Amino acid sequence: MRFFILVISMDIKLILPAPEYEAQVMEFRAEMLADGEGFDGCAGLDKAQSYAEWCDNHTLMKKLYGENCSPSDVFLAVRESDNKVVGIIDYRYVLSDFLLKYGGHTGYTVRRTERRKGYGSEMLRLLIEKAKARGEKRLLVTCDKDNEASRRTILKCFARLENEVADEAGLGKCGVIQRYWIEL
């Protein structure tokens, strides 16, 4: 019996933040704050006082986390058909002890109004391509054990659960972090 995997590319691209997306990103921020949502993978967007401060990601993260910050790139997930920011994803190149245990190489958030459309999976798939291009052999992706949507997103990218750890950092809601590896 043969199995085939059909990959359907969605109408989104990952791009680095640029001036023309300032209004959309700040609107995204306001929506997330109003809804009491988490900012996973948004690289301090909730703490940034301005778009310019957020775009200077390394300085902002160093201010927030000191020497524990990891070099990273933050990408906007932009729908090509209407140039709308539908999500944000962070790619951390170096795993500190904290990231190795709890956070992984990436975090992501899909705008509430754009959820359940497959954007999270496509964002992660596109990030995997970027990681491959950088020479990564595997990526660590984590989620709260009770976050069913994130778990499904991670599993769609052929991740394997390594283990579960107590969420001593208080990142999630249920007290348990699942750690998944994606072999590239």
Image (spheres, grey):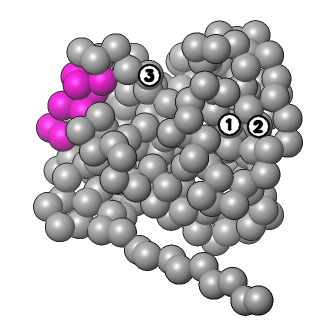
**Vertical position of residue 76 compared to residue 97: above or below:** below
Number of numbered callouts drawn: 3
Q: Which residues are magenta?
A: 23-32
Q: Amino acid at mark 3?
A: Gly
Question: Mark 1 or mark 3, which has the lower sequence index?
Answer: 3
Outermost residue toward the front? 1
Residue nearest the viewer, comparing 95 with 79: 79
Q: Give the labeled residue for mark 1.
A: 142
Q: What is the distance, in whole Å, between disc 1 and disc 3 at their CAs? A: 14 Å
Q: Is residue 17 visible?
A: no
Question: Mark 3 or mark 2, which has the lower sequence index?
Answer: 3
**Vertical position of residue 41 compared to residue 130: above or below:** above
Q: Give the labeled residue for mark 3.
A: 38
Q: Amino acid at mark 1?
A: Thr
Q: Decide whether residue 31 is among the magenta residues.
A: yes
Residue nearest the viewer, comparing 25 with 80: 80
Query: In which quadrant will I find the C terminus?
Result: bottom right
How many neighbours does mark 3 have within 10 angstroms: few (below 14), some (14-19), or many (20 or more)? some
Q: Amino acid at mark 2?
A: Arg
Q: Which mark is residue 179?
A: 2
- Disc 3 is placed on an element classified as loop
- Disc 2 is placed on an element classified as strand
What is the magenta segment's predominant secondary structure?
A: helix
Q: Decide whether residue 2 is among the magenta residues.
A: no
Identity of the residue drawn at 69% across and 60% down:
158
Q: Are marks 1 and 2 in contact (CB under 8 Å)?
A: yes
- Tell whether 176 sits left or right of 108: right
